[in-house]
Image: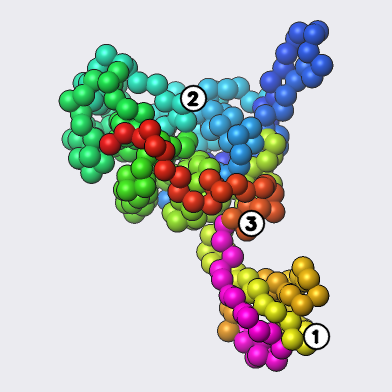
Amino acid sequence: MTSALVTTEKLTKVFRSWSLRRPNPSLTALADCTLQVQQGEIFGLLGPNGAGKTTLLRLLLGFLKPSSGRAHIDQKDCYSQSIEVRQRVSYLPGDVRLFRNMNGHQFLEFMSQLRDNTHVDRSYQLADQLDLDLSRRVSNMSTGMKQKLALVNSLATNAPLIILDEPTSNLDPTVRKNVLDTVLELQATGKTIIFSSHVLSEVEAICNRVAIMRSGELVHTQPMDALKQRHRIHARLQTPLPAVPETFQDAVTIQSPRPDRVVIDISGDLSHLLHWLSEAGLSDLEISPIGLSAVYEQFHTVDLADRNLPVNETAGP
């Protein structure tokens, strides 16, 4: 990663209503968002519905005019130069709509003729990988099949930036894995990917950095390499804990949910603290890496669907 392909500076979007009947005449959907997405990285966007993720993506694509602040893709202003920006971007929206009267072949052929950087041969190759029947008319496709078709069109591109908004919704676990593998393959060719998802395990598996959004604000940016250096220890206390060595005090956080229990969070190389742990009088030790869910929980309550790969029973083949 050498330079920023995407930059925003205090990017803000306020939706205003001039109705006198509304008690809240304006809604700040995005506030003072400043971030950079480096060329060649997979950048994750996390947050519940209403957090501002889709508003941010639509501002990047020039679909919305910012209330204040600026956004650039490949040094092009996302609003005033939106045509040039969209020539550099392949976008999968979260609420994708397809031409119902076309079959899969016709749709991919049509889309490849609209854009110079979409290749139909690559589309057919991806369709085979996802086991997608292109002979079926879109109106007769299941929700999962329509999602596959939209994904194939978005991923078969030479555009330097790919924006994926909930790309694996309505897909079964096997297809989800194939999609994630394809995204990693595209990164290996130099593509930059913005990956917005509610599924923490997917984001954790492929992203280089993750931004967590809440109520229209960017509240935390997490490099995934640093996250892999963190561990959490659950243990039973046999004796009072000895003092943490001064050298490691900034790397250790201790909580005692009960008098006989302790939770110790450690940042950095765990081996450096093994001697201190051996003298700590602990039993029933359980040591585990601190995953993305632990970071996310600092800003949002996580439900079970976010922790696992949900299977949508209506997903098509």
The kind of residue tagged 3 is: Val
Residue 55 figure quarter: top right
Q: Which of marks 2 and 1 precedes in the sequence?
A: 2
Q: Which residue is mark 1?
A: 240
Dot 2 crowding, Cα within 10 Å, few <14, some 14–19, many 20+? some
Alpha carbon separation for disc pair 3 and 1? 28 Å
Residue 90 figure quarter: top left
Which mark is on residue 295? 3
Alpha carbon separation for disc pair 1 and 2? 62 Å
Front position in the image: 23 or 234: 234
User: At numbered mark 1, what does the secondary structure look like: helix, strand or loop?
Assistant: loop
Q: Is residue 126 visible?
A: no
Q: Is residue 270 left or right of residue 207?
A: right
Q: Image height check: is 152 above or below 175?
A: above
* Residue at the image position 47 percent from the left and 36 percent from the top: 165
* Residue at the image position 78 percent from the left and 17 percent from the top: 25
Alpha carbon separation for disc pair 2 and 3? 35 Å
Q: Which residue is mark 2?
A: 82
Q: Nearer the viewer, mark 2 or mark 3?
A: 3
Dot 3 crowding, Cα within 10 Å, few <14, some 14–19, many 20+? some
| Segment colored magenta | 272-292
Q: Which of marks 3 and 2 precedes in the sequence?
A: 2
Q: Position of residue 195 (x, y in %)?
A: 47, 43
Q: Which of marks 1 and 3 precedes in the sequence?
A: 1
* Residue at the image position 50 percent from the left and 28 percent from the top: 61
